[in-house]
Amino acid sequence: MKKYLLLIAILCSISISDILAQKAMTTPDEAQRFADMVTSSLSKGEVEKSMKMVKSNLDRKSMGKESAETIKELLRFMDTSKQEMGKSLGYDLAKEEKAGKYVLRYTYVVLYESQPVWIRYTYYGNTKNYNLKSIDFGKDMEELF
């Protein structure tokens, strides 16, 4: 009986977002949901959680050293953004772009008191999965138009 209670306690402690974050993304909707979860966590200041989600889904085979550095920069930036730009006011999907059936890009905006920050997720979908290929970000609002 104790074993079952322990198992139930462990299962309850695993968050749904952690489970979804490690699942293969087979549709554009799943890719967008993943980007939404990461952006939501970043906007709440949950940088560690966001980093784990990104690491578990980034396509390391084709990711260059530059992409890895960009992700580290993003996480450092988001970690210190509250001091720079004030309180986070939430986030929003700003742009959804598709190049044919297989290349997707979602641009989100994290809203702060003084200015927004954009985060762009780029995916490539083969016949089985959509793989996260890169993440980039910035404060220049012209990138949103």
Image (spheres, helix red, strand yellow):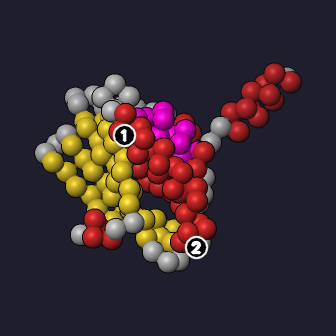
The alpha-carbon separation of the residues under discs 1 and 2 comes to: 27 Å
- Which one is nearer the viewer's eye here, 82 or 120? 82
Per the rendering, the mark at residue 82 is none
**Can the viewer see residue 41 in this picture?**
no
**Can the viewer see residue 82 in this picture?**
yes
Compared across the picture, whether 131 is left or right of 116 comes to left
50 falls in the magenta region: yes
Numbered disc 1: secondary structure: helix
Which image quarter is the N terminus in?
A: top right
Q: Residue furthest bottom?
A: 114
What range of the chain is rendered magenta? Answer: 49-58
Callout 2, which amino acid?
A: Gly
What is the magenta segment's predominant secondary structure? helix
Q: Residues within 10 Å of mark 2 (few under 14, many from 20)?
A: some
Q: Residues within 10 Å of mark 1 (few under 14, many from 20)?
A: some
Compared across the picture, whether 106 is left or right of 4 comes to left
From what the image shows, is residue 41 above or below residue 71? below
3 falls in the magenta region: no
Which image quarter is the C terminus in?
A: bottom left
Callout 1, which amino acid?
A: Ser
The residue beneath circle 2 is 86
Q: At 51% from the left edge and 68% from the top edge, which residue is drawn? A: 90
The residue beneath circle 1 is 67
From what the image shows, is residue 85 above or below residue 76? below
- Which one is nearer the viewer's eye here, 79 or 94? 79
- Which one is nearer the viewer's eye here, 137 or 35? 137
Image coords of residue 97 (percent x, y): 22, 55
Compared across the picture, whether 34 is left or right of 14 comes to left
Image coords of residue 102 (percent x, y): 19, 40
Numbered disc 2: secondary structure: loop
Instruction: Using the rendered view, name the quadrant where residue 41 is placed.
Output: bottom right
